[in-house]
Image: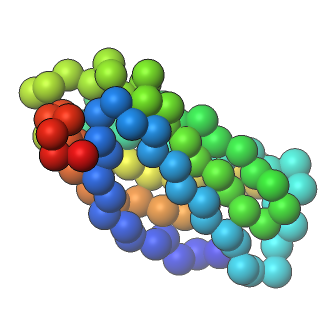
């Protein structure tokens, strides 16, 4: 597990953002945990995602209520998804996230 997948995404303010990532490597995710954060390019955390692991799939959700606290000044940010397994941390997914504040563009 040494490959970081790069995925650019769009986050619509006021809507839930959900993704599921399935690990196909021969590794057990039993007792694994995950973290996902959306940050500015300067490193300021804009919001934390809720994450869970079921079987070989990692579920990431940013609830709509969490998106509402993102300042309208931010139109672009970065996100990453980390897997914490035993004593090691792996970056699985990263990318730029475009933030759409205007509800008419949903």
Identity of the residue furthest to the front in this view: 104
Residue at image coords 81%, 55%: 54
Q: Is residue 37 visible?
A: no
Residue at image coords 50%, 32%: 63
Circle count: 0
The colour scheme is: rainbow
State left or right for residue 2 relative to residue 65: right
At which x and y percent is residue 42? Answer: 21, 36
For the N terminus, give its image quadrant: bottom right
Q: Is residue 66 above or below residue 87?
A: above
Q: Is residue 35 above or below residue 2?
A: above
Front one among 8 and 17: 17
Front one among 25 and 16: 16
At which x and y percent is residue 16? Answer: 46, 39
Identity of the residue furthest to the top in this view: 69
At which x and y percent is residue 22? Answer: 67, 69
- Examine the image and state in which quarter residue 95 appears: bottom left
Q: Is residue 7 above or below residue 52?
A: below
Q: Is residue 80 visible?
A: yes
Residue at image coords 68%, 56%: 58
State left or right for residue 22 relative to residue 2: right
State left or right for residue 20 relative to residue 17: right
Identity of the residue furthest to the left in this view: 73
Front one among 58 and 103: 103
At which x and y percent is residue 2? Answer: 58, 75
Front one among 18 and 53: 18
Residue at image coords 65%, 52%: 59
């Amino acid at each position: 597990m040494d490959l970081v997948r790069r995925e650019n995404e769009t986050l619509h303010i006021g809507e839930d953002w959900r993704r599921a990532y399935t690990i196909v490597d021969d590794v057990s995710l039993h007792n694994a945990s995950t973290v996902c954060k959306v940050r500015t390019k300067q490193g300021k955390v804009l919001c934390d995602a809720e994450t869970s692991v079921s079987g070989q799939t990692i579920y990431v959700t940013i609830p709509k209520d969490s998106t509402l606290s993102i300042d309208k000044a931010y139109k672009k940010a970065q996100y990453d998804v980390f897997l914490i397994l035993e004593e090691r941390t792996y970056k699985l997914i990263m990318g730029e996230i475009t933030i759409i504040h205007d509800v008419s563009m949903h």
